[in-house]
Image (spheres, rainbow, N blue to C red):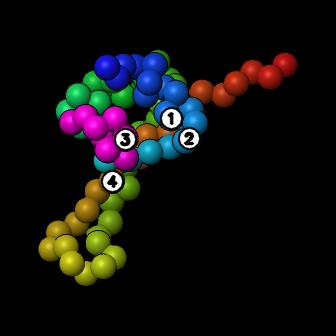
């Protein structure tokens, strides 16, 4: 079973990921991941960056929006 520490580990290794990336990797619905990501956001460990734009391939009829989650906790190496 996937939990908060699994998300932490994934984001620490990959530095950033979309909700779709996380959902695919953990084979879990995005609705389950969102509260866990919100937990790390509240703790100041994850930052959600919202990108809005249009589909570059011309196949989409509407604007696309992508949320990218970045692990922002810095390790103190001193």
Report if the CB atoms under discs 2 and 1 are less than 8 Å apart.
yes
Question: Could you say whether the residue bearing mark 3 is in a helix, strand or loop?
Answer: helix
Which part of the image, by quadrant, shows the N terminus? top left
CA–CA distance in space, label 1 to label 3: 11 Å
- Element class at badge 2: loop
Q: Residue 13 location in percent, x, y?
A: 58, 36
Q: In the rendering, at what x and y percent does residue 27 appear?
A: 28, 37
- Can you say which quadrant of the picture contains the C terminus? top right
x, y percentage for residue 22? 36, 40
To which residue does mark 4 refer? 66
- Residue 74 lies left or right of residue 68; in this view the side is right
Q: Nearer the viewer, mark 1 or mark 3?
A: 3
Q: Give the residue displayed 25% in from the left and 62% down from the top.
A: 64
The x and y percentages for residue 47 are: 47, 35
Residue at the extreme right: 78
Q: Name the residue located 30 percent from the left edge and 79 percent from the top edge.
A: 57
Q: In the figure, is residue 35 to the left or right of 39? A: left
For the residues carrying marks 2 and 4, which lies nearer the camera in this image? 2
Cα separation, mark 4 vs mark 1, equals: 17 Å
Specify the label residue 11 is tagged with: 1
Q: In front: mark 4 or mark 1?
A: 1
Q: Determine which of the numbered discs, if any, sits on residue 25 in the image.
A: 3
Q: What residue is at 28 percent from the left and 56 percent from the top?
A: 65
Mark 4, secondary structure of its residue: strand
Give the residue pinned by disc 2: 15
- Using residue 52 as the reference point, say whether residue 11 is left or right of it: right
- Nearer to me, 74 or 24: 24
């Amino acid at each position: 079973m996937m939990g908060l520490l699994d998300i932490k580990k994934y984001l620490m290794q990959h530095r950033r990921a979309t909700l779709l990336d996380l959902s695919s990797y953990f084979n879990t619905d995005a609705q389950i991941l969102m509260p866990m990501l919100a937990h790390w956001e509240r703790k100041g460990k994850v930052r959600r960056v919202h990108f809005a734009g249009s589909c570059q391939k011309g196949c989409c009829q509407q604007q696309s929006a992508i949320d990218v989650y970045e692990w922002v906790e810095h390790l103190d190496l001193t």
